[in-house]
Image (cartoon, rainbow, N blue to C red):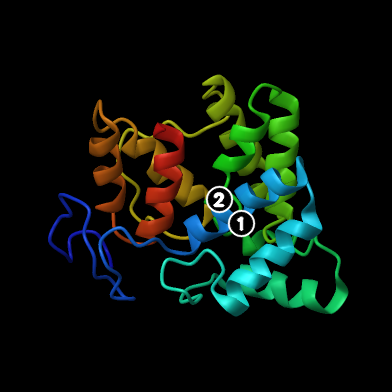
Amino acid sequence: RDRGTFEPVTTITGGGPFDLKAGQWTDDTSMAMCLAQMLRSANGWDPEDAMKRFVNWRRNGYLSSTGVCFDIGIQTAEALDLFEKTRNPYCGSTDEAKSGNGGIMRLAPVVLAYGAEVDSAIAVAQMQSRLTHASPTCMKAAASMARFMVTGDTSLLPRPEAPPDVASGYVVHTLHAAFWALTQGDSFRDVLLAAVNLGGDADTVGAVTGQLAG
């Protein structure tokens, strides 16, 4: 829902379009958990394993908070369809018109796995985005976000002084919203509440903000 059309969120709560219980997670976290399990099991980057886990989540509810895949982005669905046909794991569209935020919403496990090696963290952050979101803008967003998470370098990231007009699924809007939220408090709770109260693609704006603030 758009900002201003709902009562402000003040604590962890349920509801929403999927009528979730408080504490249940959406596709952002399920896909992040898929990456985390892949990195642990493969002891490194294995794109085919990652895509197989994404497909298992989509088809069978693997690592879903409800036991089923109840939400999936259009670009992610298209990429998984293509993977099932070709078995080529890098199925993200390079079309700039398809610069969604799916490649940054699940990024944290890569930084946790490769954070001691900045270049590797950035490279793998981009590779995991390419699985489903491979436009140049998505690649830059994944690299910039990973660099910030490892080094604190904000030189390639937006520095918004005002909240975005739209907290949409466009990757640039999502980063704008997340970095604005980071300026809205001194605690993890405060910045996360600022993020989700922007409305729009609130679960992903919240997921990205949580990764940056964490």
For residue 75, say whether it is visible.
Answer: no
Pointers 2 and 1 in contact (C-beta within 8 Å): yes
- Residue 68 placement (x, y as % from top left): 49, 77
Using a 10 Å C-alpha cutoff, classify the residue at mark 1 as few (fewer than 14 neighbours), some (14 to 19) or many (20 or more).
many
Q: Residue at x 25, y 25 (%)?
A: 186
Quadrant of the image for the N terminus? bottom left
Name the secondary structure under disc 2: loop
Distance (Cα) linking label 2 and label 1: 9 Å
Q: Position of residue 144 (x, y in %)?
A: 60, 34
Q: Is residue 199 above or below residue 10?
A: below
> Which of the 4 image quadrants contains residue 9?
bottom left
The numbered disc on residue 103 is: none
Amino acid type at circle 1 is Cys
Judged left or right of residue 173, residue 164 is left
Residue at the limit of the structure toward the left, as seen here: 7
Residue in the image at 34% along x and 76% along y: 18
Q: Which residue is mark 1?
A: 34
| Quarter residue 214 falls in | top left
